[in-house]
Image: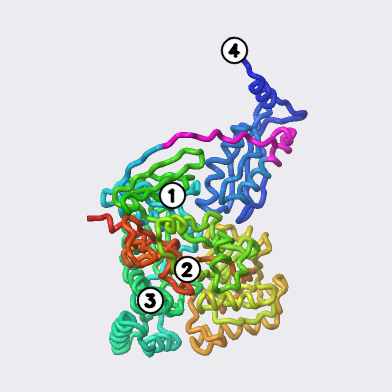
């Protein structure tokens, strides 16, 4: 004989509710998410939600993927669209739930009955103990690079990630990767670029390493000029000196040179595990030199993430990935960092013992409004809630807090970078059409800055325009739109245009009219830009070169994309040495503790060079793990 409780009876009545005029069948509806329209299909059977699917979307992988794997099943299980949003994919979650609600209405169901809040999952009180060689906190680019390096050497790795997906900010980055002397054969050296090199060579050395790099660069430059070559000149030493200078020579030059010496080997490591590079380098916004590379087989920075994860799977590497699990404290035994205390979203607690050590790869604090205004020294402490950010909401400085508890020193925390060209509402870079290093114009249709300048220079110039906004002007022929009509981030161009954040027209006059730009001035501005691109000299804003992806002389259609600066990168963080070992306030190594990526400071100075972030994360993640490899 079955026994029914009052609660079970109530649930049964709720689920057996029969709506008037309800119709079984399949229904579809679309709502706008973060990147564009999300098309949802709902199957109704016997007055219940039998199934929910996403038919089409442009949402960011892997950030929004959890809506498919968790949110949709929860809707079916609870028979309610009022389920918890997925952290980091709030706009996607809202759009899906709104579309489901629309489908229920189409079926003739009472949407109120399906709008009751779903019950929360019960919390676990279990504590688990895991023993590993290496514990890594943060599964972004730096963490995955470290995990693969250690695991390939036979080390048992536990990789923690507080988000429900691996990837961190690497997954939402543009994915560009600076490396000298690779994929540059098609690029010609300009007179402006020659002057840049000669200017660096003429600088007064400030320390022995600076002198050493100048001497090496001088020898390379003399050999280059003697060869009579007209191809682009580059070297790890030039890369290092440009990076150091761009950060006002405030960075640790030893760390900078460690980075630029190791980017090419890192590039080869990626090739060896399945990453494919485009054949030609380019110059991305704030990159300073045409040495920016990116994936041929992926869009944006997610390619690094997917490549690492696939390699771990294919090679069955000893990496245990704990998602939705936050590190709460470091375990310190006999003065050595020996593990991590963590807790999962479901309440399960973990004691993670690390025989060799712990690597912090948790990223920066760009999404932590309190921290960025506490430390900011560049923007007048005006980086509040209304200032958008390119960062995931999870970029809250957790690793910095953990390291401080262990006595770690912090460096250069006041230097926060604004990305010059982000979405005015969300701060995201995923809406771009063309390169963000294409020409910038204000509402008056005029250029006002050298778009190949440092990112802080660009951000300040852009904020000084009317309303703090400006337009990136690009050619549809050079806009990096694929055959499916998606941009470099995989977002549908149709959705971008529909959003009103970008405009498309066959002529510059029509483009100006649509975007609200002074048409006469825009035509004249583009005319002068085209003349510079043809001659290669004499740009009115002092640009040293016109790359192919910046050309506008091939005719329309054209795009004008509305942009504004947004919080992008926190240059300061935990102090490390060139082995990625964390140092205490006295400058001594903290045994067992390592760090890599944006959680660290000292590599970029006051301003990060564009396309140095992913190399920084991957290179120092690898270096940190190599400490454990015998």
Which residue is denoted by mark 4 in the rendering? 2
Which residue is denoted by mark 3 in the rendering? 239
Which residue is denoted by mark 1 in the rendering? 329
User: Residue 531: x percent and y percent?
Assistant: 55, 86
Apparent side of residue 63 relative to residue 181 in the rendered image (left or right): right
Give the mark toward the camera: 3 or 2.
Answer: 2
At mark 4, the secondary structure is: loop
At mark 2, the secondary structure is: loop
Q: Residues within 10 Å of mark 2 (few under 14, many from 20)?
A: many
- Magenta-drawn stretch contains 86: no
**519 lies above or below 153:** below
Cα distance between the residues tagged 4 and 1: 48 Å
Cα distance between the residues tagged 3 and 2: 18 Å
Q: Which residue range is magenta in the image? A: 101-127
Q: Quadrant of residue 501?
A: bottom right
Tell me, for residue 571, which label it has, or none: 2
Cα distance between the residues tagged 1 and 2: 24 Å
Residue at the (50%, 88%) spot, across then down? 535
Give the mark toward the camera: 1 or 2.
Answer: 1
Q: Please report contact status of discs 1 and 2: CB closer than 8 Å, yes or no.
A: no
Apparent side of residue 134 relative to residue 421 in the rendered image (left or right): left
User: Residue 46: x percent and y percent?
Assistant: 67, 26
Main SS, magenta residues? loop
Residue at the (32%, 62%) spot, across then down? 589
């Amino acid at each position: 004989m079955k026994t029914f409780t009052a609660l079970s009876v109530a649930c049964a009545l709720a689920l057996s509710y029969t709506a008037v005029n309800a119709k079984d069948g399949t229904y579809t509806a679309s709502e706008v998410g973060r990147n564009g329209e999300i098309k949802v299909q709902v199957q109704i059977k016997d007055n219940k939600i039998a199934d929910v699917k996403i038919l089409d979307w442009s949402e960011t992988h892997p950030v929004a993927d959890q809506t498919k794997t968790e949110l949709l099943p929860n809707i079916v299980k609870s028979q309610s669209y009022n389920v918890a949003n997925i952290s980091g994919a709030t706009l996607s979650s809202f759009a899906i739930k709104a579309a489901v609600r629309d489908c229920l209405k189409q079926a003739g169901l009472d949407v109120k009955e399906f709008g009751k809040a779903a019950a929360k999952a019960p919390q676990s009180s279990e504590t688990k103990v895991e023993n590993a060689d290496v514990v890594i906190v943060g599964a972004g680019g730096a963490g995955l690079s470290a995990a693969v390096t250690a695991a390939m050497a036979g080390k048992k790795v536990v990789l923690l990630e507080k988000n429900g997906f691996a990837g961190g900010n690497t997954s939402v980055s543009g994915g560009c990767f600076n490396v000298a002397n690779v994929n540059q054969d098609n690029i010609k050296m300009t007179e402006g670029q020659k002057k840049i090199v000669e200017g660096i060579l003429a600088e007064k050395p400030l320390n022995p390493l600076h002198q050493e790099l100048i001497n090496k660069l001088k020898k390379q430059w003399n050999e280059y000029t003697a060869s009579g070559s007209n191809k682009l000149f580059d070297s790890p030493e030039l890369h290092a000196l440009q990076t150091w200078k761009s950060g006002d020579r405030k960075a640790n030059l030893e760390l900078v040179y460690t980075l630029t010496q190791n980017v090419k080997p890192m590039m080869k490591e990626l090739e060896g595990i399945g990453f494919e590079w485009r054949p030609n380098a380019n110059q991305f916004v704030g990159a300073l030199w045409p040495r920016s590379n990116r994936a041929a087989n992926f869009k944006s920075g997610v390619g690094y993430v997917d490549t690492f994860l696939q390699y771990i799977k294919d090679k069955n590497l000893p990496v245990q990935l704990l998602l939705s699990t936050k590190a709460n404290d470091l375990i310190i035994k006999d003065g050595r960092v020996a593990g991590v205390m963590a807790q999962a979203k479901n309440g399960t607690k973990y004691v993670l013992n690390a025989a060799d050590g712990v690597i912090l790869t948790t990223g920066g604090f760009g999404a932590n409004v309190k921290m960025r205004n506490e430390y900011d020294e560049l923007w007048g402490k005006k980086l509040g809630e209304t200032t958008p950010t390119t960062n995931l909401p999870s970029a809250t400085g957790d690793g910095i807090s953990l390291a401080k508890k262990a006595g770690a020193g912090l460096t250069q925390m006041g230097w926060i970078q604004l990305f010059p060209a982000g979405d005015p509402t969300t701060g995201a870079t995923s809406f771009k059409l063309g390169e963000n290093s294409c020409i910038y114009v204000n509402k008056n249709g005029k250029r006002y800055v050298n778009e190949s300048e440092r990112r802080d220079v660009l951000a300040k110039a852009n904020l000084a325009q009317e309303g703090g906004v400006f337009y990136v002007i690009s050619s549809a022929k050079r806009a990096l739109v694929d055959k499916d009509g998606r941009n470099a981030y995989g977002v549908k161009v149709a959705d971008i245009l529909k959003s009103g954040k970008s405009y498309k027209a066959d002529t510059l006059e029509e483009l100006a009219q649509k975007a609200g730009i002074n048409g006469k001035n825009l035509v004249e501005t583009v005319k002068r830009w085209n003349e510079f691109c043809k001659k290669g000299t004499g740009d009115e804003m002092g640009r040293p070169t016109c790359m192919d992806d910046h050309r506008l002389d091939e005719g329309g259609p054209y795009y004008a994309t509305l942009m504004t600066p947004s919080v992008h990168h926190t240059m300061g963080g935990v102090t490390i040495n060139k082995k990625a070992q964390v140092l205490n306030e006295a400058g001594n190594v903290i045994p067992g503790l390592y760090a890599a990526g944006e959680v660290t400071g000292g590599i970029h100075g006051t301003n990060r060079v564009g396309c140095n972030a992913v190399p920084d994360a991957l290179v120092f993640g690898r270096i940190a793990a190599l400490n454990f490899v015998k």
